[in-house]
Amino acid sequence: MPKKVIAVLRGDYIGPEIMEAGLTVLEAASANSNFQYETIDYPFGGEAIDKCGDPLPQQTVAGCEEADAVLLSAIGGPKWDNASKRPEKGLLEIRNKLGLFSNIRPTKIDPNLSRFSPVKQEVLNNTDFVIVRELTSGIYFGTPREQHPQDALDTSTYTVQEIKRILKIGFDMSMRRKKHVTVVDKANVLATSKLWRQVTEEIKQDYPEVTVDYSYVDAAAMKIITQPTSFDVLITANLFGDILSDEASVLTGSLGTIPSMSAGTTGPNLYEPIHGSAPDIAGKGIADPISMIQSIEMMLRESFNEDYLADKIAKAVQKTIEDEITTPDIGGTATTQEVTANIVKNLKG
Ligand code: ATP
Ligand code: MG
């Protein structure tokens, strides 16, 4: 088998620190396995503005397009507050270039971390769901968008094709999980939501094993807090997904542990932690690497079908958390490097 190519975008502030940690774990996990890969670094975000005057240089676009997966750390920060180009602009553009129309965020509560959650342990139980958010259409991209002195207008549009492709991502994902899809919408009010339901009824014929239900977004927002175990795969439009995925991240009680994936149909998927570049702790060696390590775990599963390696990493992370070798954001006193070294040690044990 040819080597898999991973494009690596190390990012800004704590970005390079946690990327280093993630790649160390990937290397240790895949040593002596059949999974062969190489990583290639490309400038991106603030680093790329400094080096090339552009948050997304052409060489980075070309390198990512050719790669089998893209790993991204966090970008941006105060250094570029007054720059003529914003680092975050690169993120919108790369999603666009790679055709990444979906964003997937898991919410899985490690029992050893449930004390950081604002929600009680008995409600959290073994919460494990993902939110599949449509990323490139809906009200954030609708035209016309107009603001006048006495009124303003936003437009939300979804085509059948846009709905089908995001549903397919979610249904496929559910087949590898608990086979339960919840489509979240506002079908009592919105025409786009009514179309989502119509298309769901059609798509679900292709997935006879999957249980499908619908939830209005207001009810889903409550249930994420009151009955988080009732979900497996939530599929929803851009605006609703934006809000619900931030809400869901609160359940875990720590930003530093949550990965994400953006997927399309043709290009490579992109994997990144959900948090920002955390300028306040950069250079201190205390950034939590778990979000990055779990992004790599997700990459192994979703892009490379290496479930065995992914499970191995997941177990090693779990053991490290159990042993309380953790960074300060989740109650420990360990450094990024100590956490990483412990995870590597647990891979072997
Ligand atoms: P952005 O706008 O880029 O999302 P933000 O302002 O929301 O950034 P983050 O960079 O996500 O902020 O950081 C929010 C808080 O969480 C900060 O106090 C930061 O130190 C902390 N934090 C984020 N990521 C980590 C991590 N991996 N380890 C430890 N703490 C983190
Ligand atoms: Mg933020």
Image: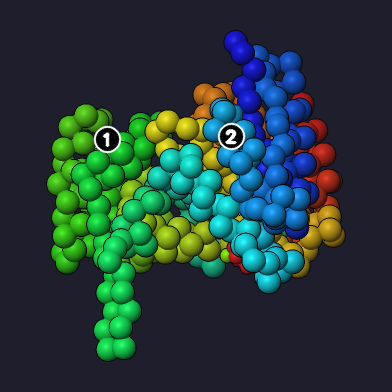
Query: Is residue 325 in sight in this rendering?
Result: no
In contact (CB < 8 Å): disc 1 and disc 2: no
Residue beneath disc 1: 210
In which of the image's four quarters is ligand 1 placed?
Answer: bottom right
Label ID, residue 294 = none
Q: Between residues 10 and 126, which one lies in front from this camera angle?
A: 10
Residue 258: percent from the left, percent from the top? Answer: 58, 51
Residue 65 sits in which quadrant? top right
Q: Which of the image's four quarters has the N terminus?
A: top right
The image shows residue 259, relative to residue 1, as above or below, that is: below
Rate crowding at label 1 as few (under 14), some (14 to 19) or many (20 or more) other CA atoms within 10 Å. Answer: some
Give the alpha-carbon distance from disc 1 to disc 2, as whole Å. 38 Å
Q: Position of residue 80 (x, y in %)?
A: 70, 65
Q: Is residue 15 left or right of residue 243?
A: right
Position of the C terminus, as image quadrant, is top right
Q: Is residue 77 left or right of residue 241?
A: right
Secondary structure, mark 2, is helix
| Residue pointed to by mark 2 | 62
Q: Which mark is first along the chain, 2 or 1?
A: 2
| Residue 89 in picture, x, y percent from top left | 56, 57
Q: What residue is rendered at 74% in x and 66% in y?
A: 79
On the image, the x and y values in percent for residue 275 come to 61, 57
Which amino acid lies under the numbered mark 2 shown in the image of this protein?
Ala
- Nearer to me, 150 or 134: 150
Which amino acid is tagged 1? Val
Place residue 35 in its image quadrant.
Answer: top right
